[in-house]
C-alpha cells in the first residue's frame, strides 16, 4: 500500500505524505507544549535553587546566633563552643572547608565585647532562557552573616 | 511550502494554541506562587536576622555595673547606660549609622525605630510588659520597627514591608558550685 502511494505522488510526494502524517491530530499540541516547557521548568529550577541558598544562609544565621549566646555566657568562644558550632554546620550538610569563622576567643572579661562572623564560599546557580535554550549560570560568591556582637557576662573573681 | 501551508492550516485550526494558553494559564499563577515562596522565606530570614541583632544588643545592655550582683539574680541596671549600650550594639549588629539609618549591607531599607525600651529593675517586677509578657527578673523590654525591601511581588503587596520585633530579655544566672 505504501509503495503504491509513493509511486503515485512522485519524487515530491514522499515529504508531503510524511508531513501529512506528521501534522496529524495532537502533534501541534505536543510541539506547543515542548516550546512552552522551558518556561515551566525555569521557575521550578530557580525556585529550588533560591530556596536552597536561603536555607543555607539561615543555617549560618542559626549557628551564629547559638554561638553568640554561648559566647555571652562563657566569655568568648571556647574550643568546645567552636567544636559544637562546626558540628552543627556539618550536621546541616555544610562543607567546613568553605566556611570561615571569625570570632572572639575565650577568655573575655565581664563587660567586654564578644563577636562572631561566619562566611561561606558558595556557588549560586540560576537558569536563564537564551536563544540556544536553557542556560545554567553559576556565580561564585560568599555568604556572610554578621559580625554580630554582644557583651561577655563571664565573671571570675 | 508544504510544511508552511500545513502550519498555517494548523494555526487556523487552532491546534496547539489551546496547549499554549493552558500552559500560560498554569504558568502565571505558578510563577507568582514561586515568587511568594521565595519572598516569604527571604523576609523570614530578614526578620530573624533583626531578631538576633535585638537579642544580642539587649543582652549587651543587661551589663550590670556591679558584676557580682548578676550572679545573685537581683541586680540593678542604670536605664540610661542600658539604653546607650543597647543603641550602640543595635547599630553595630544591624549596620546602622548614628541616626539609625541603614548602611550598606543592612537588612533594613529605612530608618530603624526603637518604639519601646523599658528597663525593669527590682521593685518594678513581677509585672507584665506592655505587650503581655510576664516579667519576673531584671529585664529589658524592646520593640523595634523598620521597613524591609520586598524582593518580588512589589506590584501586588507594595515595595516595602513593615517588620516589628518585640523582645523581653533577661539574664538568668545563679552562682555555680565549684
Image (cartoon, rainbow, N blue to C red):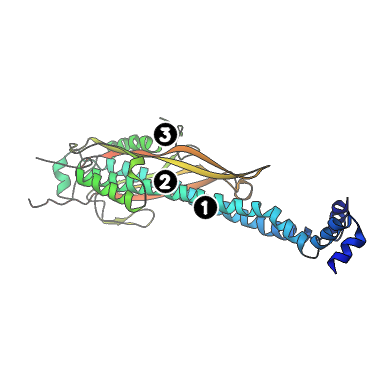
Q: Residue furthest top?
A: B98
Q: Is residue A35 left or right of residue B118?
A: right
Q: Dot 1, crowdedness within 10 Å: few (<14), some or many (≥20)? A: some
* Left or right, A130 with reference to B44: right
Q: Nearer the viewer, residue A156 or A28?
A: A28
Could you tell me if residue B151 is visible in this image?
no
Q: Which circle marks residue A48 in the picture?
A: 1
Q: CA distance from mark 1 to mark 2?
A: 14 Å
Q: CA distance from mark 1 to mark 3?
A: 32 Å
Which one is in front in this view, the residue at disc 3 or the one at disc 2?
2
- Kindly indicate whether the residues beneath marks 3 and 2 are on one polypeptide chain: no
- In this rendered view, identify the residue nearer to me: A115 or A17: A17
Which residue is under mark 3? Answer: B96
Q: Nearer the viewer, mark 1 or mark 2?
A: 1
Depicted B63 relative to depicted A89: above or below: above
Q: Where is mark 2, residue-wise? A: A57
Percent x, y for residue B145?
A: 45, 44
Please report the residue visible at 46 percent of the width from the left and 47 percent of the height from the top.
Answer: A53
The C terminus of chain A appears in which quarter of the rendering?
Answer: top left
Residue neighbourhood size for the residue with mark 3, other residues' Cα within 10 Å, grouped as few (<14), some (14–19), many (≥20): many
**Residue A56, horizontal then vertical, whole percent:** 42, 48
* Mark 2 burial class by Cα count in 10 Å: few <14, some 14-19, many 20+: many
Label 1 secondary element: helix
For disc 2, the chain is: A
Asked if one can make out residue A120 in the rendered structure from this viewpoint, the answer is yes
Q: Nearer the viewer, residue B25 or B130?
A: B25
Amino acid at each position: 500500500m505504501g509503495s503504491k502511494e509513493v509511486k503515485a505522488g512522485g519524487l515530491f510526494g514522499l515529504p508531503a505524505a510524511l508531513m501529512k502524517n506528521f501534522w496529524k491530530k495532537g502533534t501541534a499540541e505536543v510541539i506547543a507544549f515542548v516550546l512552552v516547557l522551558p518556561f515551566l521548568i525555569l521557575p521550578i529550577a530557580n525556585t529550588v535553587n533560591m530556596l536552597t541558598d536561603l536555607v543555607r544562609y539561615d543555617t549560618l544565621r542559626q549557628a551564629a546566633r547559638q554561638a553568640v549566646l554561648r559566647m555571652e555566657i562563657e566569655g568568648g568562644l571556647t574550643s568546645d563552643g567552636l567544636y559544637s558550632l562546626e558540628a552543627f554546620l556539618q550536621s546541616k550538610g555544610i562543607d567546613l572547608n568553605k566556611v570561615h569563622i571569625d570570632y572572639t576567643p575565650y577568655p573575655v572579661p565581664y563587660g567586654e565585647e564578644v563577636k562572631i562572623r561566619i562566611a561561606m564560599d558558595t556557588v549560586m546557580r540560576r537558569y536563564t532562557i537564551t536563544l540556544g535554550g536553557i542556560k545554567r549560570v553559576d556565580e561564585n560568591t560568599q555568604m556572610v552573616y554578621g559580625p554580630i556582637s554582644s557583651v561577655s557576662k563571664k565573671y571570675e573573681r | 511550502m508544504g510544511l508552511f501551508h500545513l502550519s498555517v492550516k494548523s494555526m487556523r485550526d487552532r491546534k496547539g494554541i489551546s496547549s499554549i494558553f493552558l500552559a500560560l494559564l498554569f504558568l502565571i499563577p505558578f510563577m507568582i506562587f514561586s515568587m511568594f515562596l521565595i519572598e516569604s522565606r527571604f523576609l523570614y530570614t530578614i526578620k530573624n536576622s533583626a531578631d538576633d541583632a535585638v537579642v544580642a544588643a539587649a543582652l549587651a545592655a543587661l551589663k550590670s555595673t556591679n558584676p557580682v550582683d548578676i550572679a545573685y539574680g537581683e541586680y540593678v541596671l542604670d536605664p540610661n547606660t542600658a539604653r546607650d549600650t543597647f543603641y550602640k550594639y543595635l547599630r553595630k549588629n544591624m549596620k546602622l549609622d548614628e541616626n539609625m539609618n541603614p548602611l550598606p549591607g543592612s537588612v533594613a531599607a529605612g530608618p530603624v525605630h526603637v518604639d519601646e525600651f523599658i528597663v525593669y529593675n527590682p521593685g518594678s517586677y513581677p509585672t507584665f510588659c506592655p505587650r503581655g509578657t510576664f516579667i519576673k527578673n531584671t529585664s529589658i523590654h524592646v520593640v523595634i520597627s523598620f521597613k524591609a525591601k520586598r524582593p518580588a511581588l512589589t506590584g501586588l503587596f507594595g515595595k516595602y514591608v513593615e517588620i516589628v520585633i518585640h523582645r523581653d530579655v533577661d539574664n538568668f544566672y545563679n552562682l555555680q558550685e565549684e
